[in-house]
Amino acid sequence: MRNLEAKFRLGDLDAARAAALALGYTPSANFIQRDTFFVVARGKLKLREQPPAAWLIRYERDRESGLMLSHYEIVPVADPVRTREMLARALSVLAEVRKHRSLLTRRKRPPPSRPRRESGQLRRNRSGTGRRER
C-alpha cells in the first residue's frame, strides 16, 4: 500500500484547532497511541498500540520536497504486549513514541450549484443568435 503525507511543526495547537473549527471541521475522534520502533536492516518496523487494537507496520519512506511517500504493510496483532516483548528481545527497541491524537473532519461540501436562469432569459445558441428560454 502507499501513503503520502506531510509533517510540519505547529507552534500554537489551540490557534490551529480554533481555525479548523471556524472552517467547519468538527472533532470526530481521539486516539491514545504507543508506537514502538524496532531496529531493522531496511525501512522501519513499528508496533502501533491503539487500544483496543494493535498493528505491526513495516514501511519505507521516500522524501521529496517536504512530502513523504510511504510504501507500507500492516498486520493486525492480537497480543501486543507479548509481541512487543518478543520483538524487543529479537531485534531491540530503537525508540518509543506515545501520543494523543485528535481527529477533526469536515463533511464534503457539494459542488457549487449553477445559478438558475430566470424564465424568459436570453441564452446564446451555437449560431450566436439568442433564443428565449422557458
Image (cartoon, rainbow, N blue to C red):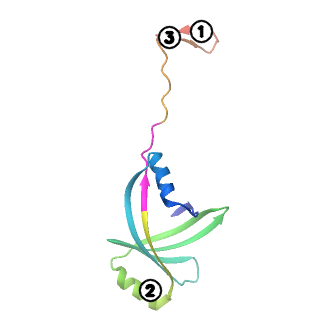
Secondary element at tag 1:
strand
Q: Is residue 103 magenta?
A: yes
User: Mark 3 Cα within 10 Å, few/some/many (few <14, many 20+)?
Assistant: few
Q: Is residue 117 left or right of residue 124?
A: left
User: Mark 1 Cα within 10 Å, few/some/many (few <14, many 20+)?
Assistant: few
Say whether disc 3 or disc 2 marks the residue closer to the N-terminus: 2
Considering depth in this image, is 132 or 110 the residue closer to the camera?
Answer: 110
Type of residue at label 2? Leu
Contact, mark 1 vs mark 2 (Cβ under 8 Å): no
Say whether disc 1 or disc 2 marks the residue closer to the N-terminus: 2
Residue placed at 36% from the left, 83% from the top? Answer: 81
Q: CA distance from mark 3 to mark 2?
A: 73 Å
Q: CA distance from mark 3 to mark 1?
A: 9 Å
**Rendered image quadrant of residue 29:** bottom left
Considering depth in this image, is 117 or 77 the residue closer to the camera?
Answer: 117
Q: Which mark is residue 87?
A: 2
Q: Is residue 75 above or below residue 15?
A: below
Q: Which residues are magenta?
A: 102-110
Residue under circle 1? Answer: 130
Q: How many marks?
A: 3
Contact, mark 3 vs mark 1 (Cβ under 8 Å): no
Q: Which mark is residue 110?
A: none
Type of residue at label 1? Gly
Residue placed at 38% from the left, 62% from the top? Answer: 30
Secondary element at tag 2:
helix
Residue placed at 36% from the left, 85% from the top? Answer: 82
Residue under circle 3? Answer: 133
